[in-house]
Amino acid sequence: MKVALASDHGGINIRKEIANLLEELNIEYVDFGCDCNTSVDYPDYALPVAEKVASGEFDRGILICGTGIGMSIAANKVKGIRCALVHDTFSAKATRAHNDTNILAMGERVIGPGLAREIAQVWLTGEFEGGRHVARIDKIKAIENKYL
Ligand code: RB5
């Protein structure tokens, strides 16, 4: 698995925690920044990660900002992206099993690094259940095709 990772200035600490986790799990990843402590615009970091996942260059993406909300909204504008904003391990497992999400968003002003690490680990290892969920994802794709 190859993971694209990015944050804005509001998510730098959790991004570092997730980078450490990916290294520990021997998961290949590329860190797309941000590289500064000054204020940056989260869509500038969500877009390249979302495009790289949508194109298949990366299998998954992880995006962190202050709340995770801006990153998730921006990423979900890219066709083929199913990004879940997650702040608990139950949802992390469920969104892989039911939604086959390919990007995880989290908010550093909402949760601490320890929980973020647990969420990411559950999400990275969670399997899509398929079955009845395939038709639901096909309906999401139909919405994309109608509006994007
Ligand atoms: C940055 O101040 C903040 O707006 C951003 O990190 C994020 O929370 C947006 O949704």
Image: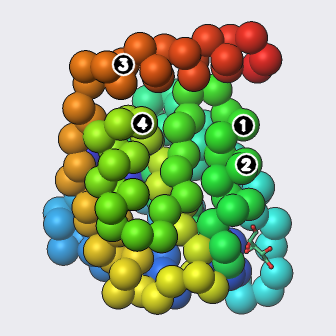
Residue under label 3, please give it: 134
Tell me whether circle 3 and circle 2 mark residues in contact (CB < 8 Å): no
Residue 61 image offset from top left, x and y in percent: 46, 51
In terms of sequence position, does the residue under pointer 2 or pointer 4 come before the other? 2
In terms of sequence position, does the residue under pointer 3 or pointer 4 come before the other? 4
What amino acid does circle 2 point to? Answer: Ala
Q: How far apart are marks 3 and 4 (CA)?
A: 9 Å
Q: Which of marks 3 and 1 is in front?
A: 3
Residue under label 4, please give it: 99
Local packing at callout 4 (Cα closer than 10 Å; few below 14, some 14-19, many 20+) is: many
Residue at figure coordinates x 64%, y 26% from the top left: 79
Secondary element under disc 2, as helix, strand or loop, is helix
Q: Where the N terminus falls, by quadrant? A: top left
Secondary element under disc 3, as helix, strand or loop, is helix
Q: Nearer the viewer, mark 3 or mark 2?
A: 3
Q: Distance between the residues labelled 4 and 1?
A: 16 Å
Q: Where the C terminus falls, by quadrant? A: top right
Residue toward you, 70 or 5: 70
Q: Distance between the residues labelled 2 and 1?
A: 5 Å
Tell me whether circle 2 and circle 4 mark residues in contact (CB < 8 Å): no
